Image (tube, rainbow, N blue to C red):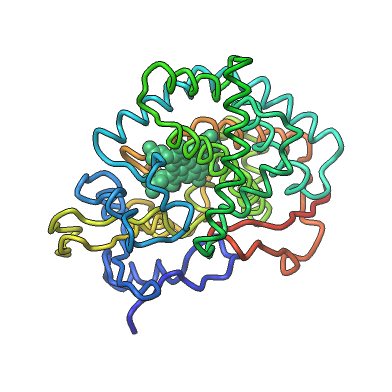
Amino acid sequence: MPASFPFTTPRSLDDEPEAQELLASGGSVVPASMGPITIWLALSYAACRQVLTDPRFSREEATRPGGPVTIPSGANPLVLTSMEGRKHARTRKLVAAAFSPRMVATLEPRVQAIVDSLLDAGPTDLVAGLCVPLPTTVICELLGAPYSDAPDIRRWTGRLMTARLTPDELREAEHDMQGYLADLVEFKRLQPDDKLITALVAVHDEGGHLTSAELLANLQLLLAAGHDTTVNQLGNSLLTLLRHPAEMRRLIDSPALIDTAVDELLRFSRLMAATLPRVTTEAVELDGVRLDAGAAVLPIISAANRDPSVFPDPDRLDLGRADAAPLAMGFGPHYCLGAQLAKLELRVALTSVLKRFPGLRLAVDESELTYRMETNVRALVSLPVAW
Ligand code: HEM
């Protein structure tokens, strides 16, 4: 039977058995139906990496009308993830300049202080008590948005992350979020600060490279994708640790493992099956399979992260593993711009939870955990714990 995407994997699973089975049965690149279109699934680590780095696999082509779409808000042609080549490099440089590693490094004490104050109450539901407020507070502070706007930001983000939106619903969701951001941009012009929106406004005003529409679309990307991913990856990582008490104990006893642990949890604890689709600009060979020009291709990073030729014994969680970089944050020119920030938050949050609550355990039966079904990402509704 031909494969089809999205997979039907239950949200509760850390892995993606359907994709792993396809890879194991010999195909590192296989065709699948995605609604009315045929899309090639890149399943192996090597195939995914080629799709993410080889310029003949184009995001720009994939965002043209009629192109493959896995999440409607991801098809906006104005955002970084939809650009290619020189245009992408130029825009990314502008955004990255405002979002420098130095800016992120100076955030560490603040991230620690936020985590400490969230944990002071004693965790009961880690989703509501830590996973949602930490990245939301951090992204608001980084951009220079008032935290009192967080409930609206979460609501708009929830709509933008919805997997099936009509064009009208998408327009309305973008209109609400970008209307808010346009007001904030005007405010920052009058009262500049040392935060990211002010820095991007300066880039926009001086360089003339970012149009107003590009500025707003990319701020939306930073605000929405820039915190919802971390919210859910943190929840999934905590659940994975609770499911592997011996590995959790290992991390409690050896906190210096935290960097490899964060990477291993990104590899092992699936956030999403695939990253954004690409379309070939010319005929190309992908891991031995010849694709025509105009072929839609989907990098199945969840399968690549369990590719046994790169990660020996891939279904074993090993917090000391250092085999290869997981593809959970992409690879190549579109590699996650927020990776350092997200890893900082994961590192500080996981270290602090385990240090303060080494007896952490689930307070309900695992079968009672539920997930948000309207989104493509694996998103726990709550994570009730005792300690
Ligand atoms: C654990 C959390 C995160 C995960 C798993 C994640 C995942 C990803 C992935 C897979 C991509 C590559 C998309 C592709 O090439 O198809 C990406 C790109 C991106 N991410 Fe993240 N992300 C996370 C956190 C963040 C944060 C915190 C921010 C910003 C504050 C952010 C901003 C971006 C941006 C702007 C891009 C586009 C880069 C480009 O196209 O050049 N992400 N992310």
- Name the residue located 47 percent from the left edge and 65 percent from the top edge: 16
- Name the residue located 65 percent from the left edge and 26 percent from the top edge: 141
**Residue 218 in sight here:** yes
Image quadrant holding the N terminus, namely bottom left
The answer to whether 54 appears left or right of 77 in the picture is left
- Name the residue located 84 percent from the left edge and 33 percent from the top edge: 120
**Residue 263 in sight here:** no
* Quadrant in the rendering for residue 13: bottom right
Front residue of 5 and 73: 73
Q: Residue 169: x percent and y percent? A: 57, 59
Q: Residue 73: x percent and y percent? A: 48, 52
Examine the rendered structure and indicate whether residue 366 appears above or below residue 161.
below
Front residue of 295 and 177: 177
* Quadrant in the rendering for residue 109: top right
Q: Residue 216: x percent and y percent? A: 50, 36
Point out the residue furthest to the right here.
121
